[in-house]
Image (spheres, rainbow, N blue to C red):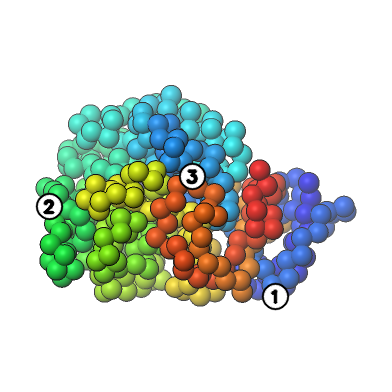
């Protein structure tokens, strides 16, 4: 199928006609299906370096297919699937299974992330080489959900992935400092009498890991940066030329620990929501590039795991279908910034060469069309995710994703998933 996106604005530029044929942005062709794109903005397809798809193991919360649909509806053309499935994605067999399920769903490119350690247990290095050379072609390794706490193991993992330009994505949490933690450690936790998760538990691990990455000369990626202090550690490391990249989630850019006061577990997440001044520092860091990308940490949870007492609820929030509207609500129509932090830079970090490219003739037609003037109320019952744990229910957000194209095929048209 060929398409003509009529009157589209590429990254906010003057309206033009954009043709898609044979999987690429093309010169004008005949018989293209016309999409009225007046008032719509075209962005390179979004890329998420941090998504939990829950398959295998917790298909009641999400499957590769339902998560892929949520991603496409959110404007994504590629997502990196975290390894904390059951069984854990710590072998070539499991990462190939996830990769194959992604291909079968055919809605986004699903790039599996491999575990750093066997069973995420932090004791023994997983078969990183076998996962890298498998059909899934794994380049990002992470124990996300857990921190690779052992510095010797972390060093060895960094050394190992250097050979194939892989990257270790660290969930930075010094567990000894977060035992029993329920929320951010600060004024609000004191008031509520809940055990706190101090900022230093994140900052100490990032400081250690940038030194290890510097020593080894290898690539480190820091997951879900959540504190102002972490930003400063990263700023210094980058100034020294350490090969470190970092992500921030939409929820850490928007929400604060005050929300824990209502004890609604929809606001429980790891790392926890922080303070207003952390939020301000994160927003600035994304602008000035100290933080490279927005990553969703889309963490679907079944109703019984979320709608219970705060202390027993699983941490995590949905993110794929609301990420772009949240970013638009914070930064406004800064399309270059959005394209860089949500498509180009994540594609570069993940090594996904077909994604995050320029929307010029000959490039793979991975793109999304956004209506920036539309505003929508987030209704959990309308989400494509199998789970309902969105912290944005009832909020009015700007920006509607009208269409998404994966290698020239529409995955979303008229705001609806094509399959
Ligand atoms: O909130 C979180 N949820 N943080 C994590 O690190 C893991 C994730 C999950 O898997 O639910
Ligand atoms: Zn995660």
Near mark 3 (Cα within 10 A), the count class, few <14, some 14-19 or many ≥20, is some
Circle nearer the viewer, 2 or 3:
3
Q: Residue furthest top?
A: 93
Q: Position of residue 340 (x, y in %)?
A: 50, 62
For this view, does 28 lie left or right of residue 323?
right
Disc 1 target residue: 14
- Please report contact status of discs 3 and 1: CB closer than 8 Å, yes or no: no
Tell me the SS state at disc 2: helix
Q: Residue at x 15, y 59 (%)?
A: 194
Q: Position of residue 167 (x, y in %)?
A: 36, 44
Task: Give the CA separation, mark 2 to mark 3.
Answer: 34 Å
Q: Position of residue 321 (x, y in %)?
A: 51, 56
Task: Give the CA separation, mark 1 to mark 2.
Answer: 52 Å
| Rendered image: mark on residue 177 | 2
Near mark 1 (Cα within 10 A), the count class, few <14, some 14-19 or many ≥20, is few
| Rendered image: mark on residue 386 | 3
Q: Position of residue 96 (x, y in %)?
A: 48, 28
Tell me the SS state at disc 1: loop
For marks 2 and 3 on the same chain, the one whose residue lies earlier in the sequence: 2
Is residue 100 in sight in this rendering? yes
Quarter of the figure with residue 201: bottom left
Is residue 274 in sight in this rendering? no
For marks 3 and 1 on the same chain, the one whose residue lies earlier in the sequence: 1
Does mark 1 have its CB less than 8 Å from ligand 2?
Answer: no
Tell me the SS state at disc 3: loop
Task: Give the CA separation, mark 3 to mark 1.
Answer: 39 Å
Question: Can you say which quadrant of the picture contains the C terminus?
Answer: top right
Depth check: give the residue in front, 82 or 241.
Answer: 82
For marks 1 and 2 on the same chain, the one whose residue lies earlier in the sequence: 1
Q: Residue furthest right?
A: 30
Depth check: give the residue in front, 2 or 193.
Answer: 193
């Amino acid at each position: 199928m060929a398409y003509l996106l009529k009157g589209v604005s590429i990254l906010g530029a003057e309206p033009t006609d954009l043709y898609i044929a044979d999987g690429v942005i093309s010169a004008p062709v005949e018989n293209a299906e016309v999409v009225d794109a007046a008032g719509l903005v075209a962005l390179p397809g979004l890329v998420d370096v941090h998504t939990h798809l829950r398959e295998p193991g917790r298909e009641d919360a999400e499957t590769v297919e339902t998560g892929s649909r949520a991603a496409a509806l959110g404007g994504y053309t590629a997502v990196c699937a975290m390894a904390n499935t059951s069984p854990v994605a710590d072998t070539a067999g499991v990462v190939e299974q996830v990769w194959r399920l992604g291909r079968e769903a055919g809605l986004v490119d699903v790039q599996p992330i491999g575990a750093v350690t066997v069973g995420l247990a932090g004791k023994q290095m997983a078969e990183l080489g076998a996962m890298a050379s498998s059909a899934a072609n794994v380049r990002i390794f992470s124990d996300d959900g857990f921190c690779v706490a052992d510095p010797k193991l972390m060093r060895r993992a960094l050394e190992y992935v250097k050979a194939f330009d892989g990257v270790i994505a660290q969930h930075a949490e010094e567990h000894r400092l977060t035992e029993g933690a329920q929320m951010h450690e600060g004024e609000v936790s004191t008031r509520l009498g809940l055990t706190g998760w101090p900022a230093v538990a994140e900052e100490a691990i990032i400081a250690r890991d940038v030194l290890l990455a510097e020593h080894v000369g290898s690539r480190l990626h820091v997951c879900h940066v959540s504190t102002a202090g972490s930003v400063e550690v990263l700023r210094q490391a980058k100034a020294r030329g350490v090969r470190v990249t970092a992500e921030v989630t939409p929820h850490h850019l928007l929400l604060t620990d005050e929300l824990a006061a209502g004890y609604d577990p929809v606001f429980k997440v790891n790392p926890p929501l922080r303070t207003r001044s952390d939020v301000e520092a994160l927003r600035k860091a994304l602008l000035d590039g100290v933080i490279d990308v927005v990553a969703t940490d889309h963490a679907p949870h079944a109703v019984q795991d979320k709608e219970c007492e705060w202390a027993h609820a699983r941490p995590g929030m949905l993110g794929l279908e609301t990420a772009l509207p949240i970013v638009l609500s914070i930064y406004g129509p800064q399309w270059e910034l959005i394209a860089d932090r949500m498509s180009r830079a994540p594609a570069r970090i993940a090594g996904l060469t077909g994604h995050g490219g320029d929307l010029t003739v000959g490039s793979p037609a991975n793109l999304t069309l956004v209506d920036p003037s539309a505003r929508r109320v987030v209704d959990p019952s309308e989400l494509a995710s199998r789970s309902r744990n969105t912290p944005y229910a009832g909020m009015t957000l700007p920006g509607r994703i009208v269409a998404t194209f994966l290698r020239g095929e529409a995955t979303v048209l008229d705001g609806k998933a094509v399959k």
